[in-house]
Image: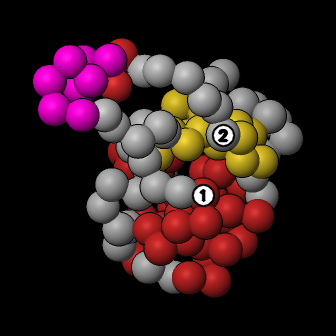
């Protein structure tokens, strides 16, 4: 097993996996396959939290392979949390406000 595969295995086995700013950049073909594998391997076994400024309906756009993206998104339970973030409070004092983040929780 090479270093990259060991890192993916560690992500799959982590007690809690937090992925911040999902969809900031579209994934490349191999990346979306690995992401799908990690998320589906963790499904119903270990909690995963994913934050994103994308609306949940836009998450599939982050995947190169749209079918793989749809399958990955279907394995998760989306939750929208409202409230103010620290970044939002900082932004409010200067130039406006940030959109609320979306949060995906897989338990």
Classify 5 as above or below 31: above
- Is 94 within the magenta? yes
Side of 107 relative to 91 (left or right): right
Side of 78 relative to 54 (left or right): right
Q: Which label number is shown at residue 80? A: 2
Quadrant of the rendered image containing residue 49? top right
Q: Whole-percent x and y of residue 83?
A: 55, 23
Q: Residue furthest right?
A: 44
Q: Quadrant of the C terminus?
A: top right
Q: Whole-percent x and y of residue 25?
A: 30, 61
Quadrant of the rendered image containing residue 82? top right
The foreground one among 46 and 8 is: 46
Q: Whole-percent x and y of residue 3?
A: 36, 45
Classify 35 as above or below 102: below
Mark 1: few/some/many CA within 10 Å (<14, 14-19, 20+): some
**Mark 2 element type:** loop
Q: Residue at image x 47%, y 21%?
A: 84
Magenta range is: 89-96
Q: Which label number is shown at residue 56? A: 1
């Amino acid at each position: 097993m090479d270093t990259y595969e060991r890192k993916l295995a560690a992500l799959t086995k982590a007690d809690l996996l937090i992925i911040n700013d999902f969809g900031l950049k579209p994934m490349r073909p191999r990346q979306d396959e690995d992401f799908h594998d990690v998320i589906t391997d963790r499904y119903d076994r270990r909690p995963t939290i994913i934050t994103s400024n994308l609306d949940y309906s836009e998450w599939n756009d982050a995947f190169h392979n749209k079918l793989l993206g749809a399958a990955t998104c279907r394995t998760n339970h989306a939750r929208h949390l409202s409230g103010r973030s620290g970044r939002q409070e900082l932004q409010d004092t200067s130039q406006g406000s940030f959109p609320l983040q979306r949060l995906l929780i897989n338990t």
